[in-house]
Structures are given as structure tokens and as C-alpha cells.
Image (cartoon, grey):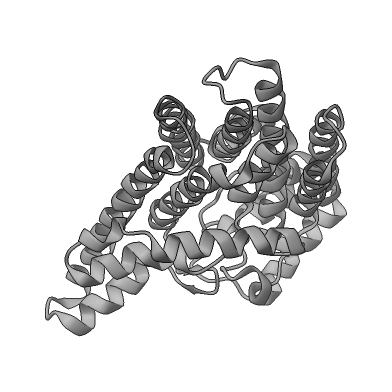
Amino acid sequence: MDELKKVASLIDDLIVNDDFPAGVEPEYLRATVMDYPSRGGKRLRPALLIWCCGLLGGDVDTALYPAMAAELFHNWTLVHDDIIDEDRMRRGQLTTHESLRLFAREKFDGGDLAADKFGQNFAILAGDIQHGWSLNSVLKSAQHGLSAELSLALGQRLLELGSCQLISGEALDVEFPMRKWQNISSEEVLHMLELKTGALLRFCAEAGAAIALNTCDFERKEIKMLGDFAAASGIAFQLQDDWLGIFGNFDKLGKDIASDLASEKPTILLLKTFESLKPEMQLHLAGMLGMDEYTEEIIEQVRTLMWDCGAEAYVRQKADEFTKQAQDILKQFPDNEYRSHLLELSSFLVNRDQ
């Protein structure tokens, strides 16, 4: 998507040139704070915010700092999420805590356990600073075209949806593996996805609309409709993300395939597979969860089970249904270039391969 690349370029420039990280010490922590945000990425959330603003006739230039804030907020959640999931790779490079662990081993003489603790501790701190950087960016929008009242309202809304709902969704996600998979319903997982993934996307859509309408009333019909569009798109996005976690390609995805199996994460894909298998095959699949390493042969066995029982097709269908729900909402808005961008974005979310 060429228009998405244009948004990404604008956000990249803002992030690299923003002055907030300059005061972070020590220097390697400052570099770590800049790491994920500077790796690029698709910048889906900034695009959603900017295009929702344009959809309703707003000045998209005034939406740039809130858009950067959404991207920074997303990045700190990735840093902390990678620690929780014990992931080693992110966007084709080492995760923050893993990179810091190797840094500590080279710089300090404390042994592997100390290096592991250092990596996790400093990654948490880096995420905390990114969280603050995000809120600072929202407030800074008052210096770049928005009223102080609206900037404050956007900051409050970001904390409500991000720091409350998103983290609640992450908490549910962390809790699920502690429960027996038989006791977790698909409805619970969908609710978790709506919080963990949908909440920040909802903020982006609502913020863009609020900027366009110059209002602090997030109960306005247009704002709520675009929020619902974003939330439905977010669930479709996450369903596709879970699908890619099994059926994706590492070189394109930039993170480990089968990490959801290793962590025994009860995705809808995995739950539907268990529901559709006979008891003896359920035991066979259960034996392939929680392993330290996954060979291509084991991954292919899991894929075959998911294909043959229909779980793979079910998840793809559900993603398509949420995409259609999102697009039906969007089609109620004026037909302009920004609606076209948003429709293309919603299709991209469920058809992407990385």
C-alpha cells in the first residue's frame, strides 16, 4: 500500500527527530528506548488515526502527533509482551530484553543469571519510558494545531483504552495458559482480543474522528461507529496474526513460528482444533505443546491436524466475517480517498503474510 508507506515515512521522521528521549540515561537505555520505534514497521495504527481524521474532513497534519503517540504506545506494549512471552525475535531482530541480555554479558561480569535479570529489568524500564513518551506526544499535539482541551481529552482516552483495557486484555491472555484449555471458550478469547488488540485501534479511529470534528465527546455517533469499525478490524487482524503464528513464514514474519505452541497459548485456532479432534488426537496434539524447540516436522504435523479438522478454515472464515463487519460500517461514511484507504487497510489486515 503506497499510501501506508507515506504515513510510515511521516511517523518515522517524527519519531527519529522527537526530543523526548534525549534526557534518558544511561546512553544505552536511551538507545534501547529508540530501538523498536526506529525499526520501522507497517505503522498501521498511525494510518488508521490519520485516515479517520481525513475521512470526516479534518486537517490530517494536526493528527500527526496523536498518530505518533499511538505507535509509541503500541511499541512499549510489544517490549513488555516479548518479556512475558519470552520471545527472542521481533521484526527480524532480537527482542529488547534479549538484546540487553547479550549487552550485559559483554559489558558486565555478572554471569548468565545476572545478565538475564538485567535484560528483563532494563527492557521493562525501556517500555515504561516509551509509555511516557507516548503520552507526552499526545500532549504535544496542543503545540501543533489542536486545542489544549482536545489534547488532554485524547490523552485521557488513550489511558482509558490503552492503559486500562489493553493491559486488561493482556492480563487475560497471560491467565489463559494457567487454565485448562477445555475451560476456555472462544467467546472469552474474542473478548480478550477486543481488549488487547482492539482497544488501541479503537483509540486511533476515535481520536482521528474527534480531531476532525474538533470535539471531546467520544459518544458522538460518527466516533462510536469508527471505533466499532476499528475494533472489528482489530479482531480480524489478531485472528490473522494467530494464523501466521502457525502457518506463516519466518523470513517474512520476523519472529519465531510456533511460539504460540511453545507457550501453550489458547488461540481460537488451537481451541477450535481441540474441539474438532477425537480424544486420541487431542492427546497427540497436547503432547506437541510446551516444547522447548520445534522442528519443521513437528510444525507440519500440527498444521496438518489444523487443516484436516477444519480449524484452519474456520479461523480464516471468522477473520473474513469480522473484516466484512468492519467494511459494512465504513461504507456508511462518505466515499472519498480516505475511505478507500481504510477499506484497503481492512482488507490488508486479514490478507497480510507478515
- Residue 340 drawn at (x, y percent): 84, 46
Residue found farthest to the bottom: 106
User: As displayed, is residue 317 above or below residue 28?
Assistant: above
- Image-based side of 261 in relation to 39, left or right: right
Examine the rendering and report whether any part of residue 87 can be seen: no
The quadrant of the image that shows the N terminus is bottom right
- Image-based side of 6 in relation to 255, left or right: right
Residue visible at 22% across and 84% down? 106
- Judging depth in this view, the residue of 57 and 155 nearest the camera is 57
User: As displayed, is residue 159 above or below residue 254?
Assistant: above
- Residue 94 drawn at (x, y percent): 44, 73
- Judging depth in this view, the residue of 223 and 258 nearest the camera is 223
Residue visible at 84% across and 56% down? 307
- Residue 71 drawn at (x, y percent): 50, 51
- Image-based side of 107 in relation to 217, left or right: left
The quadrant of the image that shows the C terminus is bottom right
